[in-house]
Image: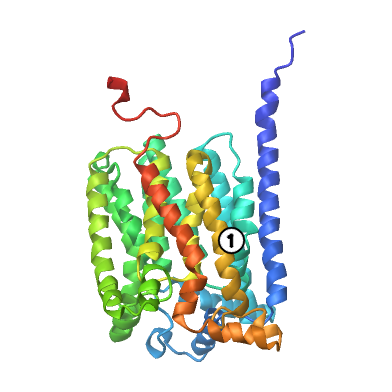
Amino acid sequence: MPEPDHRQSVPSSLPLNTGRDMLILVLAVLAARACYIAIAGDFVSADLQTWQALAARMDRGEFVYATTDRLNWPPLWMQIIWLLQRLAGLLHLPHTVVVRGFLAGCDTVLVLLAYRLARGLVPGTRLFWPLLLGIALHPTFVALTGQHGNFDVLVAIALVASMGALAAWQRTQRPDYWLWACACLGLGILAKTIPFVLIPLLFLGLRRLSASYRALGALLLLGPVTLGMSVLYVIAPAAIRANVLGYRSFPGYFGIGGLLNALGASGLMTVFEKAFLPLLLGYLVILGVALYRRDDLEPRRILLIAAATLLAIPTLGPGFSVQYIYWFTPLLLLLWHLEPRLRSATVVMLVLALSSTAVVYTFGGDYGALIAQRTDAEWAWRINAWLVDKPHQTLVFLPLFAGYVLLLVRMILLCRQPAPGEAPVGAAHA
């Protein structure tokens, strides 16, 4: 009688472990956010109040791009607000609750997508604990959904899907993966314009593709946002130029811009704001040319370049919002097994993010002031009033800025180094 083949039991157990991990991640995301929403109640950010006001305006038949200056992005989020308003009416729930429920569902999609992609990037590995602690249960991400209510999680989903498809394109050489990367990045641009900074990564291996594939990829990448923005522009060209095409993030309270503002160097801050965009565009051109000349690049470097480029915008740029942490954190977690040398810097950044955001979400007025709103204590409202000044916010966000700088420097250095166990370039010829 032949001996049993124990190797057959390993693959059969993997789906069970995968299913268990994914179920726990889903339950953790939903439970943490449901509890937070129940605690926060009506004490929500200015953004959530804005979405509710915009939904009411659309109910009255207003074209909100023309009648307000509160929509600064392509039309996807406006359409979602309208749909969620219909759903809120059917469920007899407040619009703010339905929006946060929708965003919690998006968080679930994000962690599941990242989990599945990680298994493809490094077969046999699990990204369960990094995703559980880094997103599902991390208080900053829970507050972003349960109190802040901004929609950068949609951008994160698109970025993870696009970079995952691009890594698969490099691994398998199947052009359909490149088309998927274009389509997902295009949907991300339809939500917010920031994913355009990753377009140069699509130039990688472009020379191997036929003209038909290139044309279809360009259509998938730029077609949705071009069509959506063109309709808006025809209806309200001046408003679209001012509020969407001319929109810039709030400057002067984070990082370099915040420090210059706090030091009273308004002249340098103005120069800094004007110089950043040309410098960014120059970097993107150089990156695109460099990648166009390459036919392949390992997934580790693809994710490092993507995450570093996205992180550089709030770290080195004049504008900042807390929700920008969604842009690069999932990509950092996808690097957990691909680039173990980045783990410590990622953990430090996530801890420092908690230290900074805990203050603004509990006392900051625009963020919902969860504790200040629930007490008449004079000390709480003094902190609330103290946070109104930009230099004070710069001080509060200084630990997060330090974490961003540390992480960015570490990623830049790792981009130039071989992967663990990989021989340095030229070593084989020594």
Q: Say whether residue 316 is left or right of residue 387.
A: left
Display colour scheme: rainbow
Q: Quadrant of residue 74?
A: bottom left
Q: Locate residue 283 relative to residue 138 in the image: left or right.
A: left
The residue singled out by tag 1 in the image is 107
Dot 1: few (<14), some (14–19), or many (≥20) neighbours within 10 Å?
many
Q: Position of residue 303 (x, y in %)?
A: 42, 47
Q: Residue furthest front?
A: 263
Image coordinates for residue 13, horizontal then vertical, percent: 70, 33
The answer to whether 237 appears left or right of 399 in the picture is: left
**Residue under the image location 29 percent in, 73 percent down:** 273
Three-letter code, disc 1: Asp
Q: Residue furthest top?
A: 1
Q: Give whichever of 151, 63 is nearer the camera.
A: 151
> Which image quadrant is residue 104 in?
bottom right
- Please give the name of the residue rendered at 31% of the width and 21% of the height, measured from the top-left corner: 428
Foreground residue, 408 or 382? 382
Residue 10's place in the image compared with 320, above or below, is above
Name the quadrant of the N terminus.
top right
Q: Is residue 427 visible?
A: yes
Residue 76 coordinates in the image, percent (x, y): 44, 71
Placement of 188 over or under 334, stated as above or below: below
Residue closest to the far right: 1
Name the residue located 32 percent from the left edge and 24 percent from the top edge: 427
Number of numbered callouts drawn: 1
Residue 414 appears in which quarter of the rendering? top left
